[in-house]
Image: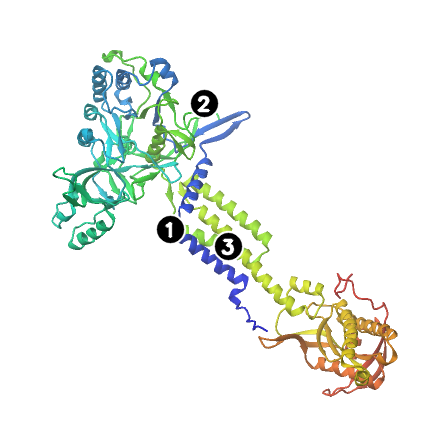
Amino acid sequence: MAKEKKRLKIFETKYFGLIIGLVLVLLLFWLKEGVHLPLLENLELKMVDIHFNFKNIVLKKNIQEGVTLETRNPNISPDLLIVGIDFKTLTTFGNWPFPRYTHANLIDNFARIQNQEERERALFLDIFFIEPGDSGVDDALLIESIQQNGRVFLETVLDETPPPSVSREEFFRRQEILYEGWGEIRNIKGDWEHMEAFYGLQPPLQPYARATHGYGHANFDSDADKVYRRQGLVSKSSKLIDTIILRNLTPDTPINRENFERLSWEDKDGIVHAVPYPLTEKVIRDLKEAMQDNAPMKNVDTDDDGEPDDSYFVIRKYRDHFVPAITISLALQYFNKRVDDLEVVLGDYILIPSPQYFNTETNSWGPYQREVKQAKFDEEGNMIEPPEWEVVEEIRIPIDEQGKMLINFMGPPSFAAAGERQTFPIRSYSGYASRPTGADPKTWPRTKAVGNKILMVVPFARGMAADQKTTPYGLMYGVEIHTNSLNTIIMNNFLKSVPLWLDFLILFMLIMITAFMSARLSTVLSLILALVLIVVFFIGVSFVFDDQAYIVNFSTTAIGIFFAFITIVVYRIMTEERDKARIRSMFGKYVSPKVVDQILENPPELGGVDKDLTVCFSDIRGFTTLSESMTPQELVNHLNLYLTAMTDIILDFSGTLDKYVGDEIMWFFGAPIPQDDHALIACKCALNQMKALNKLNSEWPPEKRINIGIGLNTGIMTVGNMGSLGRMNYTLMGDNVNLGARLEGTNKQYLTNIIISEFTFGMVKDRIIARELDNIRVKGKNKPVLIYELIDCIDGFDPPAKEDNGKKTS
C-alpha cells in the first residue's frame, strides 16, 4: 500500500484559500502595474466609459405637483458657447466653404459692440486657413478683422510625417510666426526626448499667423480601442535641422539642450530611437553596435555610375518645439495668462499659477473663484441661501508622460435633435453673421450677450467635414471634444486616479474578503456574496467617479473577486473529492454505503477519541470439529455463507465492521456515525443474527450446522484510526472492549448464545427481555460484572428506519 501522508494544516481550504487570495492579489497587481497588460487596461477604459454614462448631467427637483425644477450640472461652465455652422447657416449663406468675408463679418459683429467690457473672452475659429481663399480681397478683409478683434485664436495641425520638401520651410516659417506672437512652451521638465514626435505641421498662412492673437494645435489622441478620451495638451513638433554621419559623431558634436535639440536614429522597422545624452565614448560605441545590427545604411552614388561610392549610417538632429493644444491656449486667455506662465512636468502636471477671472459686473480682473455650493431659492424664486465660492490658487492639470490629459466629459453630444437636451449650448452661426455691423460705433448694438465667454466657431452639420470621433458618449464633433477638454480645465474638475497604495489596498481587501468567504461558506452563499460585493463595489466606484472625479480601478478588482471565488471553489472540489475518496477507502470496508454517505456529509474526527459505544463479538462453537468434517475448500465456502449473512445484518443495522479473526467477528455501534440507541441496536442486531443463523442451519445437514456465541458490552472506548501512516485500521481499544470479548467466550459455560453486560442491560432494560445469569469476575477485572442472557426485544428486532440511523425520534 502506498504511504499516505497527512495533509498539512496550511493546505486546509480555510487556510489555503487565503493564500490563493494573496497570490491573486500580487499577480493581478503585477499584471496591471508591472506588465501593463493591455487586456486589463482596455477593460478599465471601458469601465470609465460606463461611469461616464452613469453621470448625473441634470439635477431634477419636484417643487410642486406637476412642476419640476431642472438645475444644470454645476461642473459645466456657463462661459463656453459653440457657434455652429449648421443647416440654418447653410440655407442662409449657401454652399460650404463660405467666402471668407463672411467670417470677417462674424468677427466684426462680435467686436463691434458699444459696451466693450461685454465682449467675448476668446473667439476660436475651428476652420483651416492653410491655403489662400478664392478671393485675395476676402482674405485681406478677414485678416484685418482678425487683427482688429484682438481675441481670435486659430489652429494648427500636427502631422506624423514631414511636409513635402517644396513647402517644408514655408510651413515651419508659419509656425515660427505663431511662436513669436503667442509663444511656445519652454518651461518643461521630464523625459521630453521620448515624447511622441510630430515631424510635419499645417499652420495657417503667414498673414493669418501674424494677425491672430493666439493659436494651438487641434490634434486628438485615441486610446488603443480607437475611442477618444484624452487630449495632448502639450505636443512635440520636431524640425530636422541636420543629418550627421555616424562615423563623424564625437563627444564634441554640438547639441543645444536649452533649445531642446536632440539626436535620433531609425531602425529597419521604422522605429525611432533617441541617442542618449550626454555623448560619451561609451555612448557612441554602443550606438555604433546597435546601428550596425539594426539600422539601414544610406548608399551614395557620387559619380552616377550605378554603384554606391559610399555607405554610412545616418544620425538625425532635431530641434523640438512644445506646442500647446488649442484648449490650453484658450484656458490661458480665460485666466489672463500667457504660455510663458505654464510649468509642465511630464508624467505629473501642467501648472497654471494664480489664475484670474474677469468680472463683467465690476469690469475688472480678480482671483479666479469656483462655485462649490449653489444658491438655494424658495418656490417663489427668492434666494434663501447664497452660493459658496472658493478661490482657486492654481490650476494643476494631471497629465501622463506624453502630456495627455484624460477629459472629464460632461454629457452626451450637444448636436441633438430639436427638443433634446444639450450638454453645451449651441447657437447658429447665421444668427451672429447674417447682418454685418458697420464701422460707425453709433450703430453698434450695446451687447451680444457673450460677455467673458469663449466662443468656438465650427462647422456643425453632418456631411460638412469628417470631424466626428468616437467618445465614451458615442460620436462627437471635434469641437465638442475641445469644449469638454476646455471645461475640464477651467472648472478645475480633473479626473484623477486614486493613489497606487489605495488601489492596492482596495484590491487586497476585496479579494481577501472573497477568499475568506469562499473558503468557509457554502458555494452558493459564497457566490451570492461575491456578486453582491461586486455590485456594491461598482456602485461605490461610480459614486466616487461622479461626485469626486476619482477613478478607482474596478475591472482588475472585479476580475480578482471572480477568480478568487472560482479558484477556491475548484480547490475545495479537488480537496473534498480527495477526502471523499480517502473516507470511502477507509470506511467502505467497515460500514454500509449509506453510512459512508453520511460520513462524507459530516466527516468524523480522525485519530483516537473517547466515545460511549457498544461493542460486539461473535465466535463459532465447535469450529475444530466442523473443520474436520470438510475439505479446506468446502470449509471456506461454508464459512463465507455464514460470514456474509452475519455481515449483511451488521450493515443493515448501520454497524461498523471492525475485523474478522478466523471465524470470529468484531463490530460496534455509535461510531463513526453517532447513534443514540446504540445499545438497543446492538441487541436487535444480535437477535437478528441468531434468527438468520437458525434459518441457515435449517437448510444445512446436521454435520454442517453452526452454533455461535455473541458478547455485547457498552461503555467508554477509544475509537479511531490506529496503526501507522502507511497502514491503519478504524478500530476500538480499552477495557470495555476486552470485556465484550470475554463475554462472548462466557457463552460456553452457560450454554447460551447472547450475553450482555450489566452496562448494556442498564441502557435497554425497559425495551428487552433478558434473564439474569450470574455475577462473574472476568480476567483482567477485579470487580465482578453482572451478566444477562438476551432473549428478545419487546418492540421487535427489525432494523431501524434508514432515516433514523439509530437516533431517537419523537
Q: Secondary structure at mark 1?
A: helix
Q: Is residue 725 left or right of residue 160?
A: right
Q: Give the foreground label among 2 and 3.
A: 2
Q: Residue at x 45, y 21 (%)?
A: 418
Residue located farthest toward the front when viewing the structure as drawn: 305
Q: Nearer the viewer, residue 316 or 773?
A: 316
Whichever of callouts 1 and 2 sits on the residue coming sooner in the sequence is 1
Q: Residues within 10 Å of mark 2 (few under 14, many from 20)?
A: few
The reply to whether residue 107 is in sight is yes
Q: Nearer the viewer, residue 514 or 119?
A: 514
Whichever of callouts 2 and 3 sits on the residue coming sooner in the sequence is 2
Tell me the residue that label 2 is attached to: 417
Tell me the residue that label 3 is attached to: 513
- Amino acid on which disc 2 is placed: Ala
Q: Residue at x 76, y 81 (%)?
A: 632
- Amino acid on which disc 3 is placed: Ile
Quadrant location of residue 759? bottom right
- Residue 33: image tag: 1
- Amino acid on which disc 1 is placed: Glu
- Report x, y in % for residue 381: 45, 25
Report the Cα–Cα distance between label 1 and label 2.
Answer: 43 Å
Report the Cα–Cα distance between label 3 and label 1.
Answer: 22 Å
Report the Cα–Cα distance between label 2 and label 3.
Answer: 48 Å
Whichever of callouts 3 and 1 sits on the residue coming sooner in the sequence is 1
Q: Residue at x 20, y 24 (%)?
A: 211
Q: Secondary structure at mark 3?
A: helix
Q: Give the foreground label among 3 and 1.
A: 1
- Report x, y in % for residue 183: 20, 33
Quadrant location of residue 216? top left
Q: Give the foreground label among 1 and 2.
A: 1
